[in-house]
Amino acid sequence: MTGSTGLMTDRYELTMLEAALRDGTAARPSVFELFSRRLSGGRRFGVVAGTGRLLSLLRDFRFGDDELRFLRDEKVVDAQTLRYLADYRFTGTIRGYREGELYFPGSPVLTVEGTFGDAVILETLALSVLNHDSAVATAAARMSIAAGDRPLAEMGSRRAGEDSAVAAARAAYLAGFDATSNLEAGRRWGIPTMGTAAHSWTLLHDSEEDAFRAQVDALGAETTLLIDTYDIRRGVETAIRVAGTELGGVRIDSGDLPIVAGEVRAQLDELGATGTKITVTSDLDEYAIAALAASPVDSYGVGTSVVTGSGYPTAGMVYKLVARRSPDDGWVAVAKVSENKASRGGRKAAFRTVHDGTAQDETVVVSDGFEDVAEPVAHPDGRPLQVVLVDRGEIDTAHEGAAGTEAARAHHLRVREELPVRALALSKSDPAIPTLFVDAG
């Protein structure tokens, strides 16, 4: 995406900014935290995703002539606020979990430090990116675990908005998927792309054989032929007759997949196509993939379920003020106390305790003041979970682009190995490890 992202915010953030400029609190140093109170759908872990995208969007979070003109014409804010926004650059510091990291209820996924005015208007941008991408990545990780060593392809672009489709492909890839059908995601993030033909290709031709022959002529015998436009058994026969026993693969997009896959495998073997792979699609989710574990399936293609978070399209993260500078120059921890929506005040640092390669708990150190709660030496058994993403306005570019995406994927696959066995189950349950809150000092 190019251009300003400054208006990717909600109006109330700018009206709060206007009021804060009026009463002098806009310059008050503040700490905001992005976290999730609970895991969606009784899942046992969440996956942080979207960090690299957020940093790129933050770089373009500016208010140029067009944005300022809109705000002025719509009378959103006053002249003083427009002048503030015209010079806006985020100059604070952002710490957060590395992209691909696992998170649990209360994990301080992102900590934004700056003036109230600088930090408050980032709320919607941060939440819209991390809520969407983390939901997709969490669902994708569950599917990846269910698939085991079998490859997974993301094919859900047609079930998402055009921009969210690209973001979803990225989130799925960093959580364990191997490829995407979305070419823009391939171009932008360096994700391997895949895809051959849909049912319309077969329907275009006078016969299934004509369609298969034309595809093989164009793409070679290593292509994958879609065999369920008409009769599956006849489709297999035609595919092997046209492409020979060296046919790369067949795809099944309908039927009772465990039964059909077994029948197709047997038929392919009878015809001598023992090396021809079977890919299944057809509205798969993590439960359907797990049900196919014993079936002769070689790879999966997942669409709707992964790009919509498999029933939970948002991670439910929130962005709250947790500390602010007091008039006497000290620090005050602040927190919301509403029923079922309470937050925990204070600046935080998080560590994951790992024994013999298995995660035991997550320790969140809370400070009422502003001492350095992230000092690892005080937590020798804990792996520090937060890194500096933005240092006094300077963005760490290592998290962006194709390289950042690959790094996030590698980190996720590495830390996923720390999960205890109970975390791999798909049934609803408590988080896989507890989150322990301890006071600093």
Image (spheres, rainbow, N blue to C red):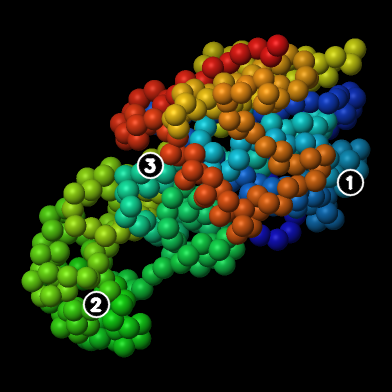
**Considering only order in the chain, which callout, 3 or 2, is on the residue closer to the N terminus?**
3
Q: Is residue 36 above or below residue 79?
A: above
Q: Disc 3 or disc 1, which is closer to the eye?
A: 3
Residue flagged by tag 3: what amino acid is it? Arg
**Considering only order in the chain, which callout, 1 or 3, is on the residue closer to the N terminus?**
1
User: How many angstroms separate mark 2 from mark 3 (CA)?
Assistant: 31 Å
Instruction: Please name whichever residue, 326 or 5, is drawn nearer the observer in this view of the structure.
Output: 326
Helix, strand or loop for disc 2: loop
User: How many angstroms separate mark 2 from mark 1 (CA)?
Assistant: 61 Å
Q: Is residue 179 left or right of residue 205?
A: right
Q: Is residue 26 left or right of residue 303?
A: right
Helix, strand or loop for disc 1: loop
Q: Residue at x 51, y 62 (%)?
A: 191
Residue linked to disc 3: 142
Tell me if residue 376 can be seen. Answer: yes
Residue flagged by tag 1: what amino acid is it? Asp
Q: Disc 2 or disc 1, which is closer to the eye?
A: 2
Instruction: Please name whichever residue, 245 or 312, is drawn nearer the observer in this view of the structure.
Output: 245
Q: Residue at x 47, y 20 (%)?
A: 434
Few, some or many C-alpha atoms within 10 Å of disc 1 (few <14, some 14-19, many ≥20)? few
Residue linked to disc 2: 247
Q: Disc 2 or disc 3, which is closer to the eye?
A: 2
Question: Which x, y percent locates residue 197?
Answer: 34, 74
Residue linked to disc 1: 87
Q: Residue at x 88, y 29 (%)?
A: 27
Question: Which x, y percent locates residue 68?
Answer: 83, 50
